[in-house]
Image: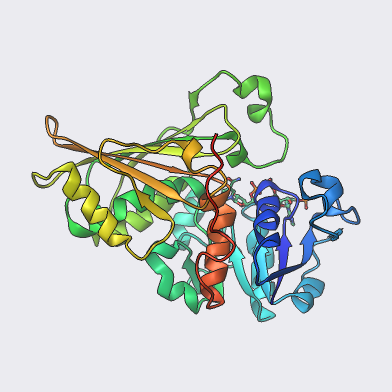
Amino acid sequence: MLRIAIVGGSGYTGIELLRILKLHPQANVVAVTSRKYAGHPVEEVFPSLHGYSDLLFTKPDVTYLSKSAEWIFTAVPHKAAMSIVPQFFDAGCRIIDLSADFRLRDRRTYETWYQAHTAPEQLDKAIYGLPEIYRKDIASAQLVANPGCYPTSAILPLVPLLHSGIISSQGIIADSKSGVSGAGRSLSMGTLFCEVNEGLKAYKVAEHRHMPEIEQELSAAAGKPVAMTFIPHLIPMTRGILTTTYARLTEEISTDKVRVVIKEFYKDSPFVRVLPEGTFPNISYVRGSNFCDIGAKVDGRTNTLILVSAIDNLVKGASGQAVQNLNIMAGLNESLGLDTIPLCP
Ligand SMILES: NC(=O)c1ccc[n+]([C@@H]2O[C@H](COP(=O)([O-])OP(=O)(O)OC[C@H]3O[C@@H](n4cnc5c(N)ncnc54)[C@H](OP(=O)(O)O)[C@@H]3O)[C@@H](O)[C@H]2O)c1
């Protein structure tokens, strides 16, 4: 059994990790941290786990946690993550960090979009945890930087097409819509019910922090620097991300051929589902699952490829992907504990 600690267990990705790991046949969660709820039973804070957890929240004490567990999930905000991850690393733990602190390989890019990096020596050691692209490197990594939710939804449909040269690396536009759990569980006015319900708004247009992360991975796929436009939106739903991407085609090609290229690229990736021609993803059809559904359409009139992808931000966009990484790092079947059918309706 894998002895696991979850740091930041009282947040949305933390509770989702617990939910998934409780039914994982090789996982034994030995500690869950929260500063606010330390000493309280997990099931008191999350009644949905009633009968599934006899753990109490503990303080995030790195010495105690690294003695109790070999596997650490850090599900804390960026900046907080880089102050604890190096300590777990030095203690010999294997870490899956859900924050943005180790996702950008270039320190200057991180510091442009976030803040000063206090553990830059770890950036080279971290592997970007998108299993469909970096499975081999993840297997032996000590530190995996779990991707962001928007980036996962935007990168997966584009990589096979940039890789094959079917689309131009110039002029890519991704329009993403996210449910409110993407903002985490801490209080903020922008995520209050009355601010979000019956509304739909764009925010951080062409200046969201996930843009450099998407560009990093698209550049790796294209083999040259890619700059793209990213427009996030907040939608009045709890979970889910739908991303519509527009790209210029470099050759005349049918929708079916595009689908075949994506399908072939992901033929060994159990969580990418390429939908039949004429069918497009719906957030409802991936809810509660680790799937990324992808639909494609060639608009021959304008020489544009339209890609639509959907994920559950808390599963494939965060905790499910983190468990997928755990499985790969531990040499287990990638789907272990994740093989669920989406909740629909
Ligand atoms: N929500 C998503 O859809 C999503 C998707 C992908 C990635 N992520 C990333 O995953 C991480 C967690 O996100 P979330 O949505 O779960 O956030 P959240 O709901 O706000 O939860 C944050 C957790 O971290 C703990 N925490 C906060 N500051 C801490 C510190 N300085 N030291 C130790 N623990 C601390 C909090 O508990 P206490 O304050 O009680 O200690 C809480 O358990 C973030 O980096 C986020 O960007 C989130």
**The N terminus is located in which quarter?**
bottom right
The answer to whether one can see residue 55 in this image is yes
**Quarter residue 217 falls in:** bottom left
Residue 148: horizontal and vertical position, in percent? 50, 51
Residue at (49, 24) in percent of width and height: 201
**Quarter residue 108 falls in:** bottom left
**The C terminus is located in which quarter?**
top right
Q: Is 116 in front, or is 135?
A: 135
Location of residue 90 with respect to 48 vertically, above or below: below
Q: How many numbered circles does the render carry? A: 0
Residue at (56, 66) in percent of width and height: 336
Considering every residue shown, the one lying at the far left of the view is: 252
Location of residue 31 with respect to 272 vertically, above or below: below
Q: Is 102 in front, or is 148?
A: 148
Location of residue 175 with respect to 329 vertically, above or below: above
Location of residue 286 with respect to 94 vertically, above or below: above
Residue at (61, 70) in percent of width and height: 95
The answer to whether residue 125 is left or right of residue 261 is right
Residue at (52, 39) in percent of width and height: 240
The answer to whether one can see residue 115 in this image is no
Residue 120: horizontal and vertical position, in percent? 54, 68
Considering every residue shown, the one lying at the far right of the view is: 39
Residue 284: horizontal and vertical position, in percent? 50, 36
Colour mapping:
rainbow
Residue 276: horizontal and vertical position, in percent? 29, 43
